[in-house]
């Protein structure tokens, strides 16, 4: 049963509309700086590209897109950001906290449009949400708040759970932040569950991380939202199934690939919002005058087939709240 049609990031070709009055915008170059592979950057950029096409900026016609991907190597981001600056792009688009840090270090003049799960003020990306100042602005969702809500949903699915493993990557923390933030710690205390942080710095660490979790015998796994997890979502879903560990993930793409459940942002919608800001900047608006927008639309997605395979019965109240139920 599906409540809403799943929209894949690769689905459909980008429309090529003419500008409203027949006049095309001037030719521009934008850079896309990704934490993962270049192919992943291209895939993730599709919703942004669609919105740009609606605004009259079409790749191959009046828009050139320069993609750069760090392949999960954080130490490459500074070099790649510098390449985009040397290319004299008109704007840089970034979708991960580490990429924002690198882009801001590389330029103070080229507009930077971001989507981030960090607090953009606390992280130093902008001066304030309403008046960003500087050359960066974009869309944000607070992952620390979402983690707490994700834990609540997991405990609603498994009310007898007492021990939860928290799988996270330190590369998803800005300025040496704590693995378990205040919101998540408070939620765990209120739900009377024990959280056990399990770290994975690189994709090669996931096998060992799951071995650690199996040895600790948690009731379920809470997966953090960061670029490393997203780029390796198929591996995480496969390992969770192999070890029969119920897991809740940050976004629907994990569940579409066989994961149990997700609660969080619809990345396609968020990336489309970024595209709107990119287009406005290309049309002459200044990032410092564009307030950082907060994502307000969140979605709950449940995979019934996976739940049955794990021997779990999804409560009717949880099913009723789901935006998408995959069978």
Image (tube, helix red, strand yellow):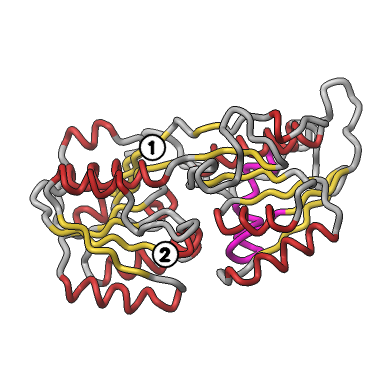
Residue at left offset 28%, top offset 64%: 197
Quadrant housing residue 165: bottom left
Most extreme residue toward the left, as rendered? 160
Q: CA distance from mark 1 to mark 2?
A: 23 Å
Q: Is residue 173 left or right of residue 136?
A: left
Please tell me which residue lies in front, 37 or 80: 80
Magenta stretch holds residue 283? no
Magenta stretch holds residue 36? yes
Mark 2 falls on what kind of element?
loop
Quickly name the residue at label 2.
169
Residue at left offset 63%, top offset 68%: 70
Position above or below: 258 against 186 = below
Please tell me which residue lies in front, 210 or 313: 210
Quickly name the residue at label 1.
299
Please tell me which residue lies in front, 285 or 220: 285
Mark 1 falls on what kind of element?
strand
Q: Residues within 10 Å of mark 1 (few under 14, many from 20)?
A: some
Residue at left offset 39%, top offset 42%: 264
- Asked whether the beta carbons under mark 1 and mark 2 sit within 8 Å of each other, the answer is no
**Does residue 221 appear in this view?**
yes
Residue at left offset 64%, top offset 51%: 94
Q: Position of residue 132 (x, y in %)?
A: 64, 35
Which label was assigned to residue 14?
Answer: none
**Does residue 327 appear in this view?**
no
Position above or below: 130 against 33 = above
Q: Is residue 48 left or right of residue 313?
A: right
Q: Nearer the viewer, mark 1 or mark 2?
A: 2
The mark nearer the N terminus, 1 or 2, is 2
Region of the chain picked out in magenta, as a range: 32-51
């Amino acid at each position: 049963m599906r409540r809403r049609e799943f929209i894949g990031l690769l689905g459909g070709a980008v429309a090529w509309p003419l500008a409203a009055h027949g006049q095309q915008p001037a030719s521009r170059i934008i850079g896309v700086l990704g934490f993962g592979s270049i192919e992943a950057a291209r895939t993730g950029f599709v919703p942004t590209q669609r919105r740009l096409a609606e605004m009259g900026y079409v790749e191959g016609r009046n828009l050139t897109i320069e993609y750069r991907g760090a392949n999960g190597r954080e130490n490459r981001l500074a070099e790649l950001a510098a390449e985009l600056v040397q290319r004299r792009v008109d704007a840089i688009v970034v979708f991960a906290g580490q990429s924002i840090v690198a882009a801001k270090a590389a330029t103070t003049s080229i507009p930077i449009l971001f989507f981030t799960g960090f607090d953009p003020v606390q992280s130093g990306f902008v001066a304030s949400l309403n008046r960003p100042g500087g050359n960066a602005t974009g869309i944000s969702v607070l992952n620390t708040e979402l983690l707490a809500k994700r834990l609540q949903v997991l405990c609603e699915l498994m009310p007898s759970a007492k021990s939860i493993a928290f799988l996270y990557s330190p590369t998803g923390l800005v300025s040496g932040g704590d693995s378990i933030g205040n919101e998540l710690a408070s939620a765990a205390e209120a739900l009377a569950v024990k959280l056990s942080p399990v770290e994975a710095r690189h994709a090669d660490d996931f096998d060992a991380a799951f071995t650690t979790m199996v040895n600790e015998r948690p009731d379920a796994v809470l997966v953090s939202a960061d670029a490393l997890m997203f780029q390796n979502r198929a591996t995480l879903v496969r390992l969770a199934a192999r070890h029969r560990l119920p897991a809740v993930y940050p976004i629907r793409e994990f569940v579409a690939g066989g994961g149990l459940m997700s609660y969080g942002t619809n990345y396609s919608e968020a990336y489309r919002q970024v595209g709107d800001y990119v287009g406005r900047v290309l049309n002459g608006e200044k990032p410092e005058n564009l307030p950082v927008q907060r994502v307000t639309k969140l979605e709950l997605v449940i995979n019934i087939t996976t739940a049955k395979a794990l021997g779990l019965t999804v409560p009717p109240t949880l099913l009723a709240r789901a935006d998408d139920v995959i069978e």
